[in-house]
Image (cartoon, helix red, strand yellow):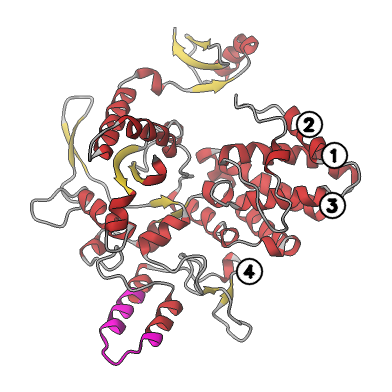
Amino acid sequence: MVEQDQCVYWTFLGIPDWFLSRGLGWFPFAVIPQSVVDEAPHGLSSVSVVVFLKFFGTGVHQFNFQTTGVKLRSTNGQLQNLKAILDTIMQDYEAFVKMFCTKGASGVVPCLVCDNVTKGRDVSGSAVLKDIRTAALADCKCHTKETMWKAVDDLAAFAADPDMKKYQFKDHEKARGFYHAPGSLLTNKPLRDVLDPADAIYLDWFHCLLASGGIATFHGNAFVRKMLELPGITLEVLDNFVASVQHCRTVQLPTDILQRVYNSQPDSGWKLQGSDNYLVIVALGAFVTMVLQPAGQLVEHCQCFLLLVTMLDIYYMADGALRFLDLLAASTAQHFTLFVKLYPGAFKPKLHFLHHIPRSMRKKRRNLNTLSAEKYHKWVRSYAKWAKGRHRERHAVHGLLLRHMTELSNPQNYMPIWVVKGSRAPVLTNLMRTLQLIPVDAEVEVKETGVCSARDA
């Protein structure tokens, strides 16, 4: 019942990407019923204050990760004090809207990261304001913690002004992109010593591209719509090609996937789970390179779509994507320009948000996404389904924590894994030894699923 709950996970940025990708590197903290969030004065923002204060308490005898830390015993038996700061908040944009009490993508100031990007205004005479449909990354004047705090503090001052008219106050909220919410996260003064809201924002590329109305859902549907205008191209033909593409994943897509999800309405997107959406986009990318490009068909549309495939290929490299940040930023900018030109009616603010993700990756030196952490949602559903009583969320999080601790204590979960064909195991073993990926006296064990791991002989 994740749809009715808010799940909170946390981690250390120093944990390697291969461990984060298995989900074990994300530690469950809380399962909060949506009813509790709805009853809070400012919803998720008020709940976030409580959550952050649990990690970074401001009282004399309260735990604070940044100042008191935790005691850990090292491998040599000595106690060491581990301290940590609140560095990054990574989630979908809609969650940031609720957490920071902003007007969101539908407001006049649709981007939480930018201080000068607007929507629905005539900005032709302004040297500072930029329209979200045309703003490149170089045009964006990014928020700082000072500009964010000033915006909410100004609103608090306006709200206390007895001469302020209601319509005037609403105009001030629209102009700043925030709404006045006393007691919310950004107005909490003690937490300002802990949280830098502008620096902490890390938009989740998985949601911006593939899930929850991501750009790929609109781009894929619009591109298929354009391909159907070509002679000989039907949904059945595309489905047959998509079904013929072999992926590393063992998930099998329905053979009529496009016939099921294609939306014939103009400027609409199809509805697919994020991981399935990725497989379809990659398969259609192969169709572009093998069929459309050699025939010289839909040149600009193919170029735009392959830029989307390139972006996804880089994002799916985990931290290996950090070597290709210049290519990712350039592909994102080119894709933005072509998409707006070819599919103007399908424009969504998430297309602009994609500009900021390579910048966050460069700053944090990590390629983060919610995909691995959300693997725990299925366990939350399972525990919540069978839990009884008034506090089913407690049973859910206790069960989740016990399972997580059990998995962490299993040495098998710390083994490196490669995906290969079983018949190639001896070849792979020799290759891995040559490249010094495994010790000389190690063997490669091939499992029935085709997944092999290196273990000491």
Horizontally, residue 200 falls left or right of residue 358, namely left
Q: In the rendered structure, find residue 380 and report the number of the disc placed on it.
A: none
Mark 1 vs mark 2, foreground winner is 2
Picture layout, residue 234 above or below residue 433: below
Q: Earlier in the sequence, mark 3 or mark 1?
A: 1
Residue 201: % across, % down:
41, 57
**10 Å crowding of disc 2: few (<14), some (14-19), many (20+):** some
Q: Tag 2's secondary structure? A: helix
Residue occupying image coordinates x 63% and y 15%: 421
Can you identify the residue that label 1 sits on? Answer: 291
Can you identify the residue that label 2 sits on? Answer: 240
Q: Earlier in the sequence, mark 4 or mark 3?
A: 4
Q: Earlier in the sequence, mark 4 or mark 2?
A: 4
Residue occupying image coordinates x 47% and y 68%: 142
Amino acid bearing label 3: Leu
Q: Tag 1's secondary structure? A: helix
